[in-house]
Amino acid sequence: MAVKLRLRREGTVKRPHYRIVVADARSPRDGRFIEVIGQYHPLENPSRIEVDNERALHWLQHGAQPTDPVQKLLRISGAWEEFKPGDAPERDRAAGEPKAKLSKKAKAKAAEAAEAGGAQ
């Protein structure tokens, strides 16, 4: 039986929250599952993530495949680092925001300001 760690949607219309479940890969998104190992509340500020790392690690070691969103949540909770030590996250949010893309006009104004500052 192919087992996956995935999100199960719960909540009302436009107010979702999710449970992280261990389920057979063939079952529907909100269908039967084997075990609940956590919760994810994306609408709270900051979003709340609760994962039973011990159970998540157990299922990962027994061959369960996480979906991409669940893998990101496991990275945040620390369970993924225990499972695969040294597997660096895709991006580090603490490193800073990516540079903003400037329009052509903004680039031209920045170039003029640099020339004017350099000429004086």
Image (tube, grey):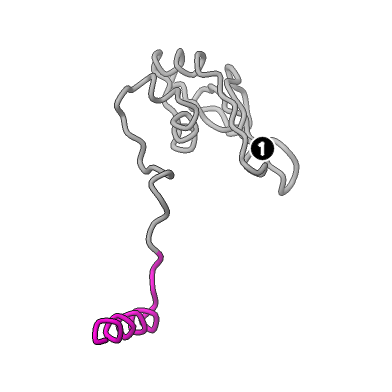
Q: Is residue 16 left or right of residue 1?
A: right
Residue under the point 45% across and 12% down: 58
**Residue 93 at x, y percent in the picture:** 43, 45
**Residue 42 at x, y percent in the picture:** 62, 41
**Residue 48 at x, y percent in the picture:** 62, 35
From what the image shows, is residue 20 above or below residue 103? Answer: above
From what the image shows, is residue 50 above or below residue 104? Answer: above
Q: Quadrant of residue 39?
A: top right
Q: Quadrant of residue 94?
A: top left
Q: Residue furthest left?
A: 119
**Residue 92 at x, y percent in the picture:** 39, 42
Question: Which quadrant holds the N terminus?
Answer: top left
Q: Which residues are magenta?
A: 100-120
Whether residue 72 is in magenta: the answer is no
Question: Between residues 50 and 67, which one lies in front from this camera angle?
Answer: 50
Q: Main secondary structure of the magenta part?
A: helix
Residue under the point 60% across and 20% down: 36
Q: Residue furthest right?
A: 12
Q: Which residue is mark 1?
A: 17
From what the image shows, is residue 78 above or below residue 46? Answer: above
Residue under the point 59% across and 21% down: 33
Q: How many marks?
A: 1
Residue under the point 49% across and 19% down: 56
From what the image shows, is residue 83 above or below residue 31? Answer: above
